[in-house]
Amino acid sequence: MRCFEEEEESAAVKIVHEIMQKESLRCDLVFIANFANFVQAFIFLEKRSETLVDRLQVFDKVIDNIHKILGIVGEDIKSKCDKVISANKDLKEIKRIAEVLKRKSNAQVIGMNIESAVCFKYAPVTSAEVERSFLQLKYILSDRQHSLTPDNF
């Protein structure tokens, strides 16, 4: 038993065939290939077990890949990316802390003691992970946690 009538099926197949023949679709698919590594990078960046240094290395690789994109749209993407990154003052600070963690810089140079810098070893770099951290802290610090003891913390 067929699910579709032959007229409907052939019309749908015909439309898909026409779409697949368009040169613009092929170009779009080739362009999308520039972003193939982003999914793995985003998954890595959201892992809690990864260090700040490792996360920033993956982030820098993504930015390098963005800068390799060719064409007018690629230039627009690079421009937007650079604008967003340059406006993020906290990213610059996090990168300086990562340099301390890699022992390439002194904590006092960035106005921080080494104990504070070490607290950033597993600092999140994605807004989703930061949001999760704040939600957990909010839950722990809420007034409803009357039975919170060092044993169950």
Image (cartoon, rainbow, N blue to C red):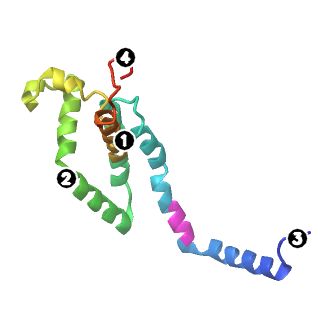
Sequence order check, earlier mark of 4 and 2: 2
Residue 117 occupies which quadrant of the picture? top left
Q: Mark 2 points at which residue?
A: 86
Q: Does the magenta stretch include residue 143?
A: no
Res. 46 mark: none
Q: Where is residue 125 in the image (x, y as percent from the top left)?
A: 31, 41
Sequence order check, earlier mark of 1 and 3: 3
Q: Where is residue 5 in the image (x, y as percent from the top left)?
A: 84, 78
Q: Where is residue 90 in the image (x, y as percent from the top left)?
A: 19, 44
Please name which of the two marks, 4 or 3, marks the residue nearer to the observer.
4
Residue situated in front as seen by the camera: 70 or 118: 118
Image position of 90 with respect to 102: above or below: below
Sequence order check, earlier mark of 3 and 2: 3
Sequence order check, earlier mark of 1 and 4: 1
Sequence order check, earlier mark of 4 and 3: 3
Query: Furthest-right residue in view?
Result: 1
- Dominant secondary structure of the residues highlighted in magenta in the image: helix
Element at label 3: loop
| Label 1–label 4 contact, CB within 8 A | no
Q: Report the span colored magenta.
A: 25-30
Image quadrant occupied by the C terminus: top left
Q: Mark 4 points at which residue?
A: 151
